[in-house]
Image (spheres, rainbow, N blue to C red):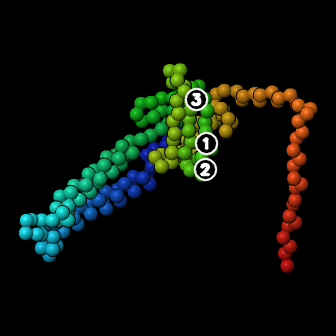
Amino acid sequence: MAVEATGSRYRQRTNYIIVIVCLGAALWFLEDGWLDEQFQQEHTRNDGPDLTLRINRLYAPVVCALLAGYFLVSTARLKGKKVAAAPDGLHFSGGRFIAYEDLERIDKKFFDSEGHFTLEYRAGGVLKRLKLSDRIYDNLPLLLDEIVRRTGAVPGAAAAAPPAEEPPAPAADPSARAPEAPPRVEKPPPQQP
C-alpha cells in the first residue's frame, strides 16, 4: 500500500480565511466609497473626489478582490497536490516520478525543527533537488519513513550510495606542537535541601 502526502489542510483553511478577510475589506471600501454619504462629503472637493475617495471607490476593492482570487486559486492548486510513495518510487500529482534507485541523498536535517526535508536525485544525468515541506503537504513524517524504508537509507547518509571513505590523515609534523587543551572543569550537581 502506498503512503500518500496530500495538500495541507491547515494552509487551505488559512487561505479561505484570507479570502473572507479580503472580500470583507473590499465590501467595506465599497461601502465607504459609494454608500456612506458622510464619508463622501468629507472627501469631496470642488473639483471632485479626492484621492481617499477614489481609492475607496475603485483601487482598494479591486486590489482586495485580486488578492482573494489569488488565494482561491492557490487553495484549488493545493487541494490537488499529492505525493505517493509506491513500491517503485515517488509519484507526484503533476505526473513527476522519481524512482528510488535515482535518489542520491535524503537531507532531513531541518525536518524536526522547520518541517521540511530535501531529496537529491538524478534525472537525465543531472543532479536535482526537491524540497518537501509540511506547509504544503500533510502526512510527511509517514512519507519520509516510507522513503527511508524503501531506499534502505541510513538517516543523514546518502540514500543509494555507499558511505564515503574518510580521507587519509596528513602525516604528523614532528616539529609542530599541538596546543594543549584547557583543563575540563565539571560542576558538581546542585544539592537539594
Q: Is residue 6 above or below residue 60?
A: above
Dot 3 or dot 2, earlier in sequence = 3
Type of the residue with mark 3: Leu
Give the percent coordinates (x, y) of residue 119. Answer: 56, 35
* Other-residue count near label 1 (Cα within 10 Å), few / some / many at <14 / 14–19 / ≥20: some
Q: Amino acid at mark 1?
A: Lys
Is 75 situated above or below 20? above
Residue type beneath disc 2: Asp
Q: Is label 1 in a helix, a strand or a loop?
A: loop
Q: Which mark is residue 48?
A: none
Numbered circle sitting on residue 112 = 2
- Spatial distance from mark 3 to mark 2, Cα to Cα? 21 Å
Mark 1 touching mark 2, by CB under 8 A? yes
Give 189 or 58, whichever is nearer the viewer. Answer: 58
Q: Identify residue for label 1.
A: 108
Identify the residue position indicated by label 3 in the image.
103
Label 1 or label 3, whichever comes before in sequence order? 3
Around disc 2, counting alpha carbons within 10 Å, would you say few (fewer than 14), some (14 to 19), or many (20 or more)? few
Marks 1 and 2 sit apart, C-alpha to C-alpha, by 8 Å
Left or right of 188, for residue 6? left
Q: Residue at x 45, y 34 (%)?
A: 92
Image quarter of residue 102: top right
Circle 2: element type: helix
Residue 109 seen:
yes
State the SS at label 3.
strand
**In the drawing, does residue 39 fall left or right of residue 91?**
left
